[in-house]
Image (cartoon, rainbow, N blue to C red):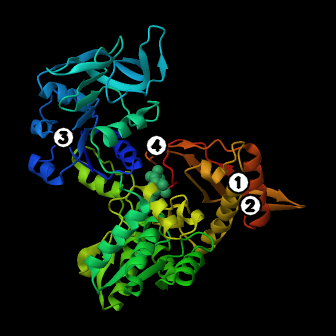
Amino acid sequence: KILILDFGSQVTQLIARRVREAHVYCELHSFDMPIEEIRAFNPAGIILSGGPNSVYESDYQADPALLELGIPVLGICYGMQWMAQSLGGKVESGHVGEFGYAEVGTVANRLFDGLADKTLPNGEHVIEVWMSHGDKVSVPPQGFTVIGSNNSCPVAAMADERRRLYGVQFHPEVTHTRKGREMLHRFVLDICAATPSWTMPNYIDDAVARIRAEVGDEEVILGLSGGVDSSVAAALIHRAIGDQLTCVFVDHGLLRLNEGQMVMDMFAKNLGVKVVHVDASADFMGQLAGETDPEKKRKIIGAEFVEVFQREAKKLTNARWLAQGTIYPDVIESAGAKTKKAHTIKSHHNVGGLPETLNLKLLEPLRELFKDEVRELGVALGLPHDMVYRHPFPGPGLGVRILGEVRKDFADLLRRADAIFIEELRNTRDEDGLSWYDKTSQAFAVFLPVKSVGVMGDGRTYDYVVALRAVVTSDFMTAHWAELPYSLLGKVSNRIINEVRGINRVVYDVSGKPPATIEWE
Ligand code: XMP
């Protein structure tokens, strides 16, 4: 396994993704992980991430003893600068930073050999990379040779191959570095000789054994939301302990069209999982009546959810465990609060956020997995592809997509409009053969409680408005509105207005995030 030390770069998670793609297990830890813990972790190699700081700031120092462990180390950007400085080399502030595409000439070395993107007439091998840095190494430490350089960055890569220490100023983890993935795989598989045993079948066997060992013959409850994470967690735990698992599915009345039925069919009928279906829509609607403030609506839905779930959980008197679909990015996010500043724009409600008063032990079998690994696992466990590759859906559901007061009649109109939009996205393919559903990261309809005038047949209408929202994003922190074809938008609009009585106008949201958010509330 590989250890990645995070100095706060925006793209550290990508390093972990690339390593896992080589079927090597890795973990991401903060740069200040104590040396005893690093030894105990016993990695085959260490990767030091980039970061926004300067090596001359004393706050961002790892323990230099990690360079003396005799295991290979690869420093990326800040990681390389830290390595250079710790071993007696020199780092200087670049007069002009370098951002974006760059070409780097290389000399023979184990990291890039055979990975050149082109060869110049003079025989020099060149790699095409992506740079993003202000500072740079000016003098490599003793024992190092320069293995990559260009005019603006004379030490673009360095190595002490005897000690197996490597540094690159560019970012091999981003796809703009054309052979970046191969370089990382070369480091992990050849230089570190890590075992590529991280595969889905191995993972399932392991996880099933671990869950059985942990839980023994005790009972487990799990809050099933219909989302990917809780669904995959349920399928995995059910594979491990069968009927010792009971799922509680709280229907808050703010789900998508037929969603409750779909969840029950898939889990209870197809997979034979015990599911308690709680129809709490009347309670939720009651609590929400008259409330128009977005933050208060979120708090009401969150609190009511916890209440209903607890009530149901308490009925299962044999349960000793609460299972949750926590995934690795959630774990990193809470652990990495030190290197990354979180800024709360909206209070998030999650099925996971249950209080400790239930007195149950926590079971989180997906804690090590990235989202795409969770999806892969779901498919391997027999969940339908469409379900596993679904767009994310927020915990408060349609509650944040009905602006202002939440009413059942509004929710019913919205559900039908939304289902038409999603159906058309799934059925319309672009020239590249992908459906627009797969080409967008998230898409949905929003109910606007304002009326506008229209004409239908011979009559005047005075009905509500629906807005369509579709975005493309890689991390949901920033997003572009999706450039859907006009013909698709036209068809969706026609169908909604014709099929959903009560809606006579459809608009498309062309706002990016920032400054808008993805959801409207
Ligand atoms: P915003 O609207 O903040 O949304 O740009 C970013 C992403 O987060 C989702 N979202 C939520 N997910 N509980 C969730 O589990 C919530 O309370 C919540 N609020 C927003 C949103 O759908 C988008 O994918």
Q: Give yes or no for contact between labels 3 and 4 (Cβ–Cβ under 8 Å).
A: no
Residue nearest the observer in this picture, 288 or 116: 116
Residue under label 4, please give it. 478
Residue 447's quadrant in the figure? bottom right
- Cβ of disc 3 within 8 Å of ligand 1? no
Check disc 3 and give the amino acid type. Ile
Residue under label 2, please give it. 496
Residue 307's quadrant in the figure? bottom left
Q: Rate crowding at label 2 as few (under 14), some (14 to 19) or many (20 or more) other CA atoms within 10 Å.
A: many
Q: In the rendered view, tell whether residue 409 sits above or below residue 133.
A: below
Q: Give yes or no for contact between labels 2 and 1 (Cβ–Cβ under 8 Å).
A: yes
Residue under label 3, please give it. 71
Residue 255 pos. (x, y %)? 55, 71
Residue under label 1, please give it. 506
Mark 1 or 4: in front is: 4
Where is ligand 1, by quadrant? bottom left
Check disc 4 and give the amino acid type. Thr
Q: Earlier in the sequence, mark 4 or mark 2?
A: 4
